[in-house]
Amino acid sequence: MSFKPKFISFDCYGTLINFEMGPTARRLFEDRVPADRMPAFLHSFRFYRLDEVLGAFKPFFDVVANSIQRTCHAHGVEYRPSDATAIYDAVKTWQPHPHVVETLQAIAQQIPLVILSNSMVDLIPHSVAHLKAPFHAVYTAEEADAYKPRAQAFEYMFDRLGCGPEQMVHVSSSFRYDHMTAFDLGFKGQAFIDRGHESWCEGYGVQRLADFRQLAEMVGVALPAQRAG
């Protein structure tokens, strides 16, 4: 499919920025969680983060604190208040995945880019700066008063852009947080960036991309190397 949308919306963490929540927690708890139990511990941490965002909005720090505390309780591991602070503060340092920066810069010359992130107003600028690309708009769960996968987060974006999903492409590495809701809302196009942290799901009208650079071809934009060669 080659469809040039009015806007392209992106999930940020995991899709554009290398989401190091698991590795950060692994390093933090390596002296409290035996190696053979670490995979199950990290799986629980991932699950509880999703569970924490399904209800009424709360600050992302609370999402992190509650989910890691619940994980510790479930696995009989000591929880320290400093754990949540260490994980939350690490988010600002995470860097883009390979080929993200140059691909975004090329696409932005022809199609406005938008971020819709489960983040906070004071947190997301650090990550946007790492991306080094011009974004038309950046929206957070804090502003929408709801986290993805709730439709309210997407609806907030539509209202601010004055554009419906039928004119947009949404890009994410997560079916759970993004693509299932995006399918139900009727996005014209969707791209799943396969980062290996979620399984592929059939039946949601999503194009699977193994390399972020493939997104440019999907939306009809030539990358610089392609123009030259």
Image (cartoon, grey):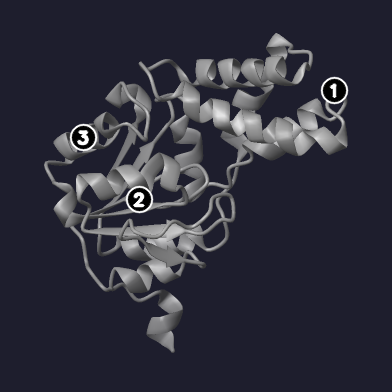
Q: Quadrant for the C terminus, please.
A: bottom left
Residue at disc 2, secondary structure: loop
Residue at image position (58%, 21%) is 67
Furthest toward the bottom, the residue is 229
Residue at image position (53%, 27%) is 49
In front here: 179 or 217?
Answer: 179
Q: CA distance from mark 2 to mark 1?
A: 42 Å
The label shown at residue 155 is: 3
Furthest toward the top, the residue is 81
Residue type at mark 3 is Glu
Residue 52 horizontal/vertical position (percent): 48, 21
Q: Say which label, 2 or 3, has the lower sequence index.
A: 2
Question: Is 129 on the left-hand or right-hand side of 94?
Answer: left
The label shown at residue 9 is: none
Identify whether 52 is placed above or below 25. Answer: above
Q: Quadrant for the N terminus, please.
A: bottom left
Q: CA distance from mark 3 to mark 1?
A: 42 Å
Q: Residues within 10 Å of mark 1 (few under 14, many from 20)?
A: some
